[in-house]
Image (cartoon, grey):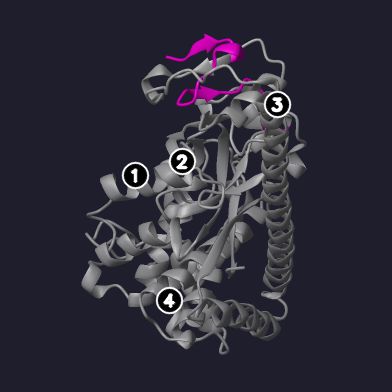
Amino acid sequence: MPEKLSPTKLRVGHAIKLPLSWLQHPFMSNKLVIENQHQIRIIQSLKLEYVYLYPDKSLAAPPEPKPASNEEVLRQIDEAAEYRATLQQKKSARIEASKMRRRSIQKTEKAFNQSFKQLHSLMKKLGSQPVTAIEEASQLTAQMAELIARPDALSLHMIATAQKDQENLYYHALNVSTLSMMLAKNLQLTEQQIQLVGFGALFHDIGKLRLPSQIMRKQQPLTKPEQNLLNLHTQYGAELAERLSVFPSEAIPILMQHHEYADGSGFPRGLKEQDIDPLAKIVMVANTFDNLCHPGPGQATRSPHTALSYMYRKMRQQLPETELKLLIKQMGVYPPGTLVQLSDDRIGMVITVNSDALLQPNIMVYEADIPRLEAPILTLTEDDLAIEKVLKPQQLPAQVLDYLNPCAQISYHVQGKQ
């Protein structure tokens, strides 16, 4: 447990935490091990009543410095001022880097919103202008596949989206399409195959458009007959696709089989893994993950982190092993949307993972003195931090939860790593 210590008693080697906002001091972190007298002078200049001392993390303190002459004291004051200016310059550079990351994320959100508008528009045309809708869907997924198929590293971003009844179906479709295409790339499929799986995933739930609205919008758990009717969406979707001559026949099994399971416990036909279409297996895994994060009425919502854990611990018999392991790998140990505590005790939420550095995600950090729209966005490597542990929403104070806003609807968008 930390102890309160007067700054006048600080020694080199002490492990401490400053009881200040991150913006109120020049250090990179609120927690540090004191390395020199300059740091002590800077901390003492902050006019704090106390700092928190961590005896178990402190290093063996060197002997007390000998009393210095007046000239030596003046020299040390000048050196401490220069040291502080250097620290502040480095910290300002980190703040600017954080702002650049935020601008990049804003561009990503704009691109996602554009993709969503395209999807929303083409789905509305499916009944009256099916050829146009299929062409627009092909263009959308071809653009995404071209980006994802590149050999370069990819960044997967979390996008916070509002919940609006029918729109949830479209957000879900875009999520499953994005995650399925990334899985297809990791399975070494061709760009054409990546596009095909993304196209099928985009339409995997179109059979639900044929279901009564009172079932799709019901906020209470479905009755058994209602659930049986909902399960017919796989058959309805495949039937609709078969009637559209422009719908790629290779994508139709995705619509029919995305609720099958490797052990034969799925629907509509109870197929075993060897009988399930390879592209449908990809979408099955991505769809299962997104459904766990965004379940139906009366079911517990899981964070991305706990959803992946549940799939691995509880559903390994139902899900194809290769695709499941690749999904867990591509989402990372800390998938976007995961709440975490950092090594300097700050609380944050993972908002981006990079395919070439899965253990080094970008994190939006809670800072009470900074507006949410300007919240710092850190990278663990550049900011010399580590994730101490994963947190559950119920572990956080209300003001932190409101600030980080781990919303019920999480969407994903992929882009080339900046």
What is the distance, in whole Å, between disc 4 and disc 2 at their CAs? Answer: 26 Å
Going by the numbered disc 3, the residue's amino acid type is: Glu
Against 94, residue 56 (above or below) is above
Task: Please tell me the numbered disc located at residue 383.
Answer: none
Q: Earlier in the sequence, mark 1 or mark 3?
A: 3
> Mark 2: few, some, or many residues within 10 Å (few <14, many ≥20)?
many
Which residue sits at x=62%, y=81%?
A: 143
Task: Please tell me the numbered disc located at residue 71.
Answer: 3
User: Which residue was labeled with disc 1?
Assistant: 310
Magenta segment boundaries in residue numbering: 1-23
- Residues at discs 1 and 3 in contact (Cβ within 8 Å): no
* Label 4 element class: helix
Against 219, residue 267 (above or below) is below
* Label 2 element class: loop
User: Which residue was labeled with disc 4?
Assistant: 185
Q: Earlier in the sequence, mark 4 or mark 2?
A: 4
* Label 3 element class: helix
Quadrant location of the C terminus in the rendered image: bottom right
- 4 or 1: mark nearer the eye: 4
Going by the numbered disc 2, the residue's amino acid type is: Arg
What is the distance, in whole Å, between disc 4 and disc 1 at their CAs? Answer: 24 Å
Q: Earlier in the sequence, mark 2 or mark 1?
A: 2
User: Which residue was labeled with disc 2?
Assistant: 302
> Residue 61: image x %, image y %?
41, 22
Q: Is residue 381 left or right of residue 398?
A: left
> Residue 351: image x %, image y %?
58, 50
> Residue 289: image x %, image y %?
43, 54
